[in-house]
């Protein structure tokens, strides 16, 4: 257990900064390239089709059931690569740490990142640390940039979704967002909800190996399933129709959302994907996903259509009604009464 | 019984719907039913029920959205409280983006003022305990559902001698607003779907005057799809049998006598006063103000808040929409200059506002063809 806290000197580039790298980051991220501690990492790549993605992570609280800011920082970026049909090759990790943050807490974050990186089979080859004055940050912010090799040919893209495509969702929605919300401890009720934080490349690879034609792929993070469906529909200028009753949602998430007046379709996920595949491939895609531990609850939730104004997503509700499933503006807020 | 699933049963829903269509077919003339409560408006849209209604049944949204009926002057008051030094303004999340005359609580927070979003009034009390060097003021918005807990919180503050905690009461009561609605000539409503959670507190008796003096029926409904469908069917049946009455369809949560404990808290903390409702004007004895014994925790007594009455933005039809006199689509701002991202009036801001619901769920809730 490391003692002490981060000081401005740890970000200064001198002895303390080197000590931080050696004592906190290297032991966890340990790989040959990183250990060389050069100004940049050298990565050998065979392919000429690369994908690059970057994301920053500011979640509070830092820890929540099922993960923490560290694991989120790894999975978030490798999943963005996976949605391009790219196998992750390497990650960078940039930290902005607030003066006074516990060294041990930082080591724990590094440990989570390392474990996530192992699970995602991606090395963290470069990093950076800056320290800001107390009050200028929220403990720790992390940025990760990932490079991947695009394996799917052609690469999935929103605009490739076509009328007739089936919408295949890899599992239940709402777990991550609700787990984080509950972890903020603002509510007087408890719920058994765990973040679904997980790396998605294996699911995508399974689809690729089974030669399932994938037109579009998205992971429904902030804004939830409804948002990515709208994004795809907008990019491809198509319509969509979704059957509410087929979208898997856990009882605990449904109950918590109901209490707060939130809609699970708009709640964030960190270990799910939705794919647009040709109708005749849908059942096969489902079988492939369900064979993987992350896809056991995969379901076909709707289809892409050619009717109605382009970009419009419709929901067939559980009671047999019908309404538009639109983009939401800003965050959902728990209701007053 | 898991309410969330059982009350969304598709087969039962279709059965009730069939009955609604049958009853509608026997009507002498089209009817207009008002769902008073914003949560009902959202439920009707969200589950696509509006689109399933027969032609002869028109659903109007009412003023049961506490965010929407809070006058601009009260938003300005909350903002001016947030601007006081060493002061934390605690508010329910929905109030953050409501436009005041120049700013919003969200903008104030972005500008560095201390605005704390709370889920429960007790969180504001906790904040006051944690920060004895700050004044904490709770912006008390809500109807009879919320007011008892705010009452409790103020009484607790008094018991504990928590001197830095106060409440700005913008609380309002639903039955007087309904009285004003039925008394007004311009909107014909043939039956009311009454708010479920307000009724949990006040019971069914306060609505009796509506069938008795005005010959219109009331059904107190829950918020699941089957609840609202049942309420609509019961109202149609009352109309057909010409027997207007107050019915409790939400029996799992509402008793005729309401919640005596909650009502007691209300009378311990509050007196009834005249209050201004956005769009409805001043309604007699429709607001709640703290009793003198609680003046130490009444923000209006502790702070010198100057506000001017503010006219609604030109062209904003929130007032008429709240009374059921106009639809959001009738407003020139709707969907153009007034959107959830850039709202002009509160009906577009609140997640339970009529305009926001029409905008989000689209196509005026009418038949959505796929």
Image (tube, coloured by chain):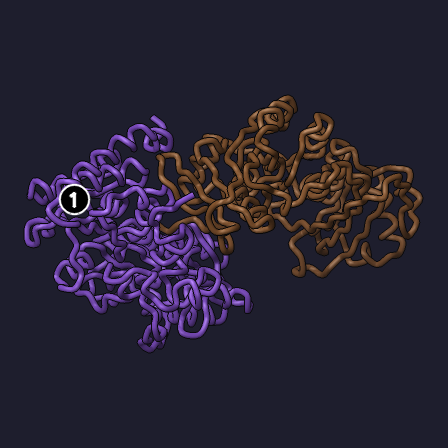
Chain colours: A brown, B purple
**Quadrant the N terminus of chain A occupies:** top right
Residue closer to the observer: B370 or A312: B370
Tell me if residue B253 comes above or below residue B151 in the rendering: above
Direction from residue A69 to residue B129 in the image, left or right? left
Q: Residue at x 91, y 52 (%)?
A: A39
Residue closer to the observer: A143 or B120: A143
Around disc 1, counting alpha carbons within 10 Å, would you say few (fewer than 14), some (14 to 19), or many (20 or more)? many
Tell me if residue A132 comes above or below residue B301 in the rendering: above
Residue A62 visible in this rendered orientation of the protein: yes
Residue closer to the observer: B330 or B342: B330
Task: Tell me where residue B243 sits by quadrant.
Answer: top left
Give the image location of residue B109, x and y in percent.
52, 64
Task: Tell me where residue A294 sits by quadrant.
Answer: top right
Residue A74 visible in this rendered orientation of the protein: no
Q: Which residue is mark 1?
A: B204
Q: Chain of mark 1?
A: B
Direction from residue B310 to residue B270 in the image, left or right? left
Give the image location of residue B310, x and y in percent.
33, 75
Give the image location of residue A103, x and y in percent.
75, 46
Tell me if residue A257 comes above or below residue A140 in the rendering: above
Residue closer to the observer: A326 or B210: A326
Tell me if residue B36 comes above or below residue B98 in the rendering: above
Direction from residue B155 to residue B342 in the image, left or right? right
Task: Tell me where residue A251 sits by quadrant.
Answer: top left
Give the image location of residue A37, x and y in percent.
91, 47
């Amino acid at each position: 257990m490391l003692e002490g806290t981060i000081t401005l000197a740890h970000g200064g580039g001198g002895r303390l900064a080197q000590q931080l790298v050696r004592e906190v980051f290297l032991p966890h991220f340990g790989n040959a390239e990183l250990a060389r501690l050069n100004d940049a990492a050298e990565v050998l790549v065979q392919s000429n089709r690369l994908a690059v993605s970057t994301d920053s992570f500011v979640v509070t609280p830092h820890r929540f059931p099922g993960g923490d800011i560290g694991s989120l920082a790894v999975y978030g970026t490798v999943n963005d690569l996976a949605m391009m049909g790219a196998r992750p090759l390497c990650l960078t990790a940039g930290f902005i740490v607030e003066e006074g943050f516990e060294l041990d807490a930082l080591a724990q974050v590094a440990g989570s990142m390392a474990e996530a990186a192992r699970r995602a089979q991606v090395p963290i080859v470069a990093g950076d640390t800056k320290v800001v004055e107390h009050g200028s940050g929220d403990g720790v912010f992390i940025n990760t940039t990932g490079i991947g090799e695009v394996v799917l040919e052609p690469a999935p893209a929103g605009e490739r979704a076509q009328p007739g495509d089936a919408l295949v969702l890899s599992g239940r929605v709402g777990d991550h967002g609700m787990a984080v919300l509950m972890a903020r401890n603002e509510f007087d009720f408890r719920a058994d909800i765990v973040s679904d934080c997980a790396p998605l490349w294996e699911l995508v690879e399974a689809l690729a190996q089974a030669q399932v034609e994938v037109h579009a792929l998205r992971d429904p993070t902030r804004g939830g399933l409804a948002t990515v469906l709208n994004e795809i529909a907008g990019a491809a200028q198509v319509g969509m129709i979704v059957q509410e009753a087929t979208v898997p949602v856990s009882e605990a998430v449904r109950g918590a959302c109901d209490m707060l007046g939130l809609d699970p379709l708009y709640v964030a996920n960190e270990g799910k994907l939705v794919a647009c595949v040709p109708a005749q491939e849908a059942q096969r895609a489902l079988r492939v996903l369900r064979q993987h531990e992350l896809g056991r609850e995969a379901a076909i939730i709707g289809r892409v259509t050619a009717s109605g104004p382009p970009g419009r997503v419709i929901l067939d509700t559980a009671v047999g009604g019908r309404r538009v499933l639109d983009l939401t503006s800003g965050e959902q807020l728990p209701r007053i009464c | 019984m898991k309410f969330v699933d059982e009350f969304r049963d598709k087969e039962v829903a279709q059965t009730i719907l069939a009955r609604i269509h049958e009853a509608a077919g026997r009507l002498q003339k089209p009817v207009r039913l008002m769902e008073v409560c914003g949560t009902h408006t959202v439920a009707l849209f969200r589950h696509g029920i509006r689109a399933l209604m027969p032609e002869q049944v028109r659903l109007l949204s009412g003023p049961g959205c506490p965010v929407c009926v809070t006058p601009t002057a009260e938003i300005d008051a909350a903002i001016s409280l947030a601007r006081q030094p060493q002061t934390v303004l605690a508010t329910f999340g929905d109030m953050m983006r409501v436009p005041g005359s120049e700013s919003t609580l969200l903008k104030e927070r972005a500008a560095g003022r201390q605005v704390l979003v709370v889920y429960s009034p007790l969180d504001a009390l906790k904040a006051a305990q944690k920060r004895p060097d700050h004044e904490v003021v709770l912006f008390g918005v809500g109807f009879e559902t919320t007011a008892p807990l705010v009452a409790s919180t103020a009484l607790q503050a008094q018991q504990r001698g928590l001197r830095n905690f106060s409440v700005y009461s913008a609380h309002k009561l639903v039955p007087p607003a309904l009285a004003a609605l039925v008394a007004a000539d311009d909107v014909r409503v043939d039956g009311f779907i009454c708010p479920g959670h307000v009724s949990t507190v006040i019971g069914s008796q306060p609505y009796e005057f509506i069938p008795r003096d005005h010959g219109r029926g009331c059904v107190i409904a829950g918020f699941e799809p089957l609840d609202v469908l049942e309420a609509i069917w019961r109202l149609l049946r009352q109309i057909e049998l010409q027997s207007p009455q107050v019915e409790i369809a939400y029996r799992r949560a509402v008793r005729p006598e309401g919640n005596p404990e909650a009502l007691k808290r209300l009378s311990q903390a509050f007196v009834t006063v005249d209050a201004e409702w956005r769009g409805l004007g001043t309604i007699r004895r429709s607001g709640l103000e703290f009793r003198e014994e609680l003046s130490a925790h009444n923000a209006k007594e502790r702070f010198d808040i100057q506000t001017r009455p503010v006219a609604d933005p030109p062209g904003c039809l929130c007032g008429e929409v709240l009374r059921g006199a106009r639809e959001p689509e009738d407003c020139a701002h709707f969907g153009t200059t007034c959107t959830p991202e850039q709202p002009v009036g509160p009906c577009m801001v609140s997640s339970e506002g009529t305009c926001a619901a029409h905008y989000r769920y689209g196509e005026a809730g009418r038949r959505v063809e796929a």
